Image: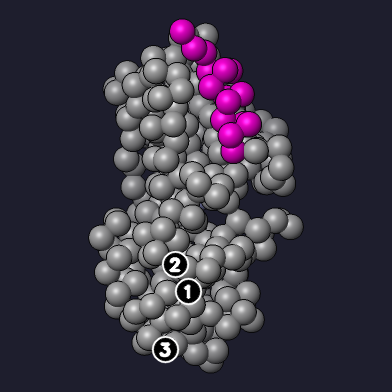
């Protein structure tokens, strides 16, 4: 018999949430009073996700993006509707944002590194005074990279302004368009992130770098999915991935 606080305590240790300076509130955002028999895993803490978690019979939901960010002072509007739904249905929500991007085993970024079989990996991506991404060596073409990403559910909208033969790749999942500057400065052949921004077209063109946008959602399913076997084994609970892709 396990409750949400015990699972939260275990995850906080495992993901070293205290080590991160994050604008998201990592940890147990909403608690409940039920024994946890089934946990849902999803990217976003939205009302649609909560409804699907309820349908799936989950007492707890673990998400990458939380529902309350720093500075939230009023529980009204959609915040109220979300909290109301969770409390009425006795569902707990745990959030792990940057700790689940950066984790060296469970993280979103290391898993994309593994998909591309990058070698000689080193940290990449300054984000709030910490490093959350990776760069490494690849041997193949830009098309080879796109194929591998697509085979693993990611999008491949791209700015193909660099070399066709790719030797170095840098990766930050989600919304890290601004780290294209760092990728240029470090001379990598290809930068992969989740979503784009208008200024990147000319920036990438003038600096002759390739940039692939794998989708914010699509590059961030890996972290929560990696926690599924871990918690199933540790707490003997049922687990289910709640897939709610976004149109972004
Ligand atoms: Zn994100």
Calculate the distance from the C-alpha at mark 1 to the C-alpha at mark 3: 14 Å
Residue identified by numbered label 3: 163
Residue ID at (63%, 31%): 13
Residue 171 left/right relative to 26: left
Residue in the picture at 65% in, 38% down = 17
- Above-or-below relation of 207 to 193: below
| Residue 210 placement, left or right of 123 | left
Q: Position of residue 225 (x, y in %)?
A: 39, 40
229 to 222, vertically: above or below = above
Q: Earlier in the sequence, mark 2 or mark 3?
A: 2
User: Spatial distance from mark 2 to mark 3, Cα to Cα?
Assistant: 17 Å
Where does the image place residue 207, in percent across and percent down from the top left?
55, 89
Q: Which residues are magenta?
A: 1-15
Instruction: Give the residue displayed 47% in from the left and 68% down from the top.
Output: 119
Label 3: state its secondary structure: loop
| Residue 10 belongs to magenta span | yes
Q: For the stretch drawn in magenta, what is the main secondary structure?
A: helix
Residue 224 position, x and y percent, is 44, 40
Query: Which mark's residue is nearer the viewer, 2 or 3?
Result: 2
**Helix, strand or loop status at disc 1:** strand
Q: Earlier in the sequence, mark 1 or mark 2?
A: 2
Q: Which mark is residue 137?
A: 1
- Which circle marks residue 118 in the picture? 2
Disc 1: CA contacts within 10 A as few (<14), some (14-19) or many (>=20): many
Label 2, residues with CA under 10 Å away: few <14, some 14-19, many ≥20? many
């Amino acid at each position: 018999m396990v409750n949400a606080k015990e699972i939260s305590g275990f995850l906080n240790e495992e993901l070293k949430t205290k080590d991160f300076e994050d604008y998201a509130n990592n940890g147990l955002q909403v608690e409940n009073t039920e024994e946890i028999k089934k946990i849902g895993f999803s990217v976003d803490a939205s009302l649609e996700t909560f409804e699907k978690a309820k349908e799936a019979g989950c007492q707890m939901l673990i998400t990458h993006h939380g529902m309350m960010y720093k500075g939230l002072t009023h529980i009204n509007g959609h915040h109220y509707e979300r909290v109301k739904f969770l409390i009425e249905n006795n569902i707990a929500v745990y959030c792990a944002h940057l700790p689940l991007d950066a984790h060296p085993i469970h993280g979103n970024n290391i898993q994309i590194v593994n998909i591309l079989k990058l070698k000689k990996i080193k940290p990449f991506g300054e984000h709030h005074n910490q490093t959350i991404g990776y760069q490494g060596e690849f041997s193949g073409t830009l098309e080879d990279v796109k194929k591998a990403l697509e085979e693993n559910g990611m999008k491949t909208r791209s700015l193909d302004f660099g070399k066709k033969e790719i030797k170095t790749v840098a990766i930050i999942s989600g919304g890290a368009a601004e780290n294209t500057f760092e990728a240029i400065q470090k001379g990598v052949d290809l930068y992969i992130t989740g979503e784009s921004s208008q200024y990147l077209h000319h920036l990438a063109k003038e600096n002759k770098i390739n940039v692939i946008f794998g989708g914010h959602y699509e590059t961030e399913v890996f972290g929560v999915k990696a926690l599924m076997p871990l918690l199933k084994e540790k707490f003997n609970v049922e687990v289910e991935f709640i897939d709610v892709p976004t149109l972004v």
